[in-house]
Image: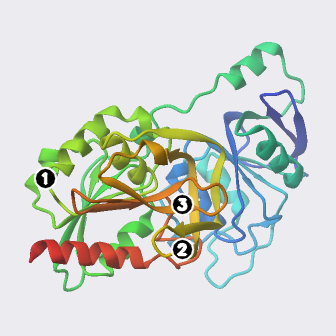
């Protein structure tokens, strides 16, 4: 029988549930995702570094654990909250169960919580810090500790440590992927389109990238406050001066905008899920996208060379930028999906076309 576990919010609200996964207390930033599928991709998405994730879909774990679907080598989130977890998964690709995976990964979980009520609190008050505990009693000092929690060294903690290379079959383009906490499928999408891929750590300098003579540079997703990465932003500004075709996704989109003088802001509760609408400004067409971010580029802060290309269909925040003074563009959402819709996968083809045209 599972022991009692408690989710303590920084405002003093306490939810009682039952423990599963690793048996340890943890503090993190509480966020929710509305994705109905892809819980393995959520668990292994590095962008959740430092966060305790609520799954709004009520049943999680029914197809078990499938390592081939992981988006990173191991989870980076601090905790996991579900309404109900499936103890007997069924899928022909299944290689384990969720509880065991969380235990092996050192991630504590809580189930049996009213995730609808919890999500409404986050929507009402905005992102809150929280603590997973095994006692409902909390002192003022402990509450202060929860309130003062801050995610730090997010990119440093999730980027690769050494350069990696992947050859494509009949690859005719060479792409450098700057790993700020990259999802694996970004690389897969490039390789299957004929790109030989070199993945480099986040703090690789602009000169080092130029020396590799790439046809293009991919700026990955990643966790944390984009404005914390001052050294990376400075190197991106220098990299842009080299005129190498560049495509940024999520954090990469934000860092590229910051390098051009734009500003970013923290959203009330972010956009996380596989059903987020992104409207293309030029055509008015709305695409359903997969997203996972708590910050956004401030549209009004974009310089003249940056034209907003997509906006969020719900709150009109910036979802994409095209640059007029260099071969570069970026989007806030995830065209590589995993999990989520493939509606915007064409953006990878646009990047391929940009690189080929630049070689002529």
Q: Residue furthest top?
A: 141
Residue 326 percent coordinates (x, y): 21, 58
Residue appearing at x 76%, y 13% in the figure: 141
Mark 1 crowdedness (10 Å alpha carbons): few <14, some 14-19, many ≥20: few
Residue 8 appears left or right of 253: right
Can you say whether 114 is above or below 188 in the image?
above
Can you say whether 121 is above or below 179 in the image?
above
State which tag comes first along the sequence, 2 or 3. 2
Can you say whether 304 is above or below 164 in the image?
above
State which tag comes first along the sequence, 2 or 1. 1
In the rendered image, which quarter is residue 121 located in?
top right
Eye-nearest disc, 2 or 1: 2
The residue singled out by tag 1 in the image is 242
The residue singled out by tag 3 in the image is 311
Residue 256 appears left or right of 183: left
Eye-nearest disc, 1 or 3: 3
Structural distance between the alpha carbons of marks 2 and 3: 10 Å
Structural distance between the alpha carbons of marks 1 and 3: 28 Å
Eye-nearest disc, 2 or 3: 2
Residue appearing at x 78%, y 37% in the figure: 125
The residue singled out by tag 2 in the image is 284
Q: Is residue 312 visible?
A: yes
């Amino acid at each position: 029988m599972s022991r009692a576990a408690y989710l303590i919010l920084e405002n003093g609200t306490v939810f009682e549930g039952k423990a599963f996964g690793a048996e340890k207390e943890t503090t993190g930033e509480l966020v929710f995702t509305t994705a109905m599928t892809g819980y393995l991709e959520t668990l292994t998405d590095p962008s959740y570094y430092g966060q305790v994730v609520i799954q709004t879909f009520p049943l999680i774990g029914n197809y078990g654990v499938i390592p081939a679907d992981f988006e990173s080598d191991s989870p980076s989130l601090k905790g996991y909250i579900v309404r109900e977890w499936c103890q007997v998964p069924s899928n022909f690709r299944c290689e384990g169960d969720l509880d065991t995976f969380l235990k092996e990964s050192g991630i504590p979980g809580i189930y049996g919580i009213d995730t609808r009520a919890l999500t409404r609190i986050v929507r009402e008050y905005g992102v809150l810090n929280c603590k997973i505990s095994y006692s409902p009693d909390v002192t003022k000092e402990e509450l202060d500790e929860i309130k003062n929690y801050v995610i730090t060294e997010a990119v440093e903690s999730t980027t690769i440590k050494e350069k990696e290379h992947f050859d494509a079959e009949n690859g005719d383009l060479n792409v450098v992927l700057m790993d700020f906490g990259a999802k694996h499928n970004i690389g897969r999408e490039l390789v299957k389109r004929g790109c030989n891929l070199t993945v480099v750590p986040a703090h690789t300098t602009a000169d080092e990238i130029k020396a590799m003579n790439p046809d293009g540079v991919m700026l990955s997703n990643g966790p944390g406050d984009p404005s914390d990465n001052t050294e990376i932003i400075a190197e991106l500004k220098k990299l842009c001066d080299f005129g190498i075709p560049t495509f940024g996704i999520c954090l990469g989109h934000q860092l590229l905008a910051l390098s051009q003088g734009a500003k970013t802001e923290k959203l009330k509760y972010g956009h996380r899920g596989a059903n987020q609408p992104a409207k293309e400004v030029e055509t008015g067409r709305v695409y359903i996208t997969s997203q996972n971010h708590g910050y956004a580029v401030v549209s009004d802060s974009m310089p003249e060379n940056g034209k907003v290309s997509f906006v969020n269909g719900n709150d009109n925040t910036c979802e994409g930028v095209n640059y007029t003074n260099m071969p570069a563009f970026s989007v806030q959402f995830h065209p590589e999906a995993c999990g989520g819709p493939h509606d915007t996968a064409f953006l990878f083809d646009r990047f391929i076309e940009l690189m080929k045209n630049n070689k002529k």
